[in-house]
Image: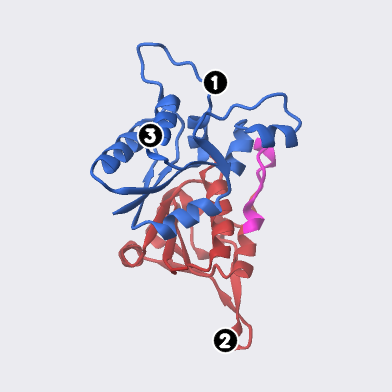
Amino acid sequence: MKFSIMVSEGPYTHQASDTAYHFTTAALKAGHEIVRVFFYHDGVNNGTRLSVPPQDDRNICTRWSELAQQHELELILCVAAAQRRGLLDEDEAKRAGKDSNNIAPGFEISGLGQLIDAGIQADRLVVFGD
Amino acid sequence: MASKKFLYVNRKAPHGSIYALESLEVVLIGAAFEQEVTLAFIDDGVYQLLQNQDSSAIGSKNFSPTYRALGDYDVNRIFVERESLELRGLSKEDLMPLTWEDEDDDWAEKDSIHVVSSAELAEIIEQQDVLLNF
């Protein structure tokens, strides 16, 4: 089956991103296809490479990056949601005149059209929120 | 491109969290994809459609006028749950008039908002392909 995933909450405060990660991992292991993982609302905060969680805890952001690398997974941060919340890639940072960028490897910034397209392409769009 | 039925379920008040505003942003972008779009407003989500909103005292942007543009984007299937309205002492008259122009009916202006029961809404939800909850 083809799944698309939407993550609506940021890391650590809510379990949404953890559960989405576990679902995605399990789906891939079972031979399903993941069309795309789309991060919206505070979910875009999953894509910062600057988070430094305690060493005895899971690193939610790095975990997504590694999964993306292993499975050529598309991790998309909504551009409008990301700009509001200070998530910028190199191009966005330059355009907005900011002195830095903070997108983790494997994540990409793109538009909301990617969410609609994810819903169209997949057999099931599964939303993980609060 | 395959056409699917998209339902956006709005459950939260317009202010207090960003879900209502960011839901509307998805709806407006999604309208360009030529899918069948339906909006549902339940629970505190019914407050999103209230007339005469004024958010100046909390310093948040009043985005409620944007709902009036939905008709221009061919988003005209808007369902509001009757029970949610009644529980909050509201009726359809408290909501913004949202309309669209029917090109198959000499551009007659028609109501986009339909107040339906929870049971009717359940049937509408049942018919959808893609459901996004906000």
Q: Residue at x 36, y 63 (%)?
A: B129
User: Which residue is the site of mark 1?
Assistant: A50
Q: Which amino acid type is shown beneath numbered disc 1?
A: Leu
Mark 2 lies on a secondary structure that is: helix
Q: Which residues are magenta?
A: B54-66
Q: Position of residue B1 (x, y in %)?
A: 47, 68
Mark 3, chain letter?
A
Indicate which disc, 1 or 3, sits on the residue closer to the N terminus. 1
Q: Residue at x 60, y 71 (%)?
A: B99
Measure how far apart labels 2 and 3 are at the Cα level: 52 Å
User: Which residue is the site of mark 3?
Assistant: A70
Q: Position of residue A89 (x, y in %)?
A: 62, 33
Give A77 or B108, whichever is nearer the viewer.
Answer: A77
Label the blue chain with its letter. Answer: A
Q: Position of residue A39 (x, y in %)?
A: 48, 40
Give B101 or B95, whichever is nearer the viewer.
Answer: B101
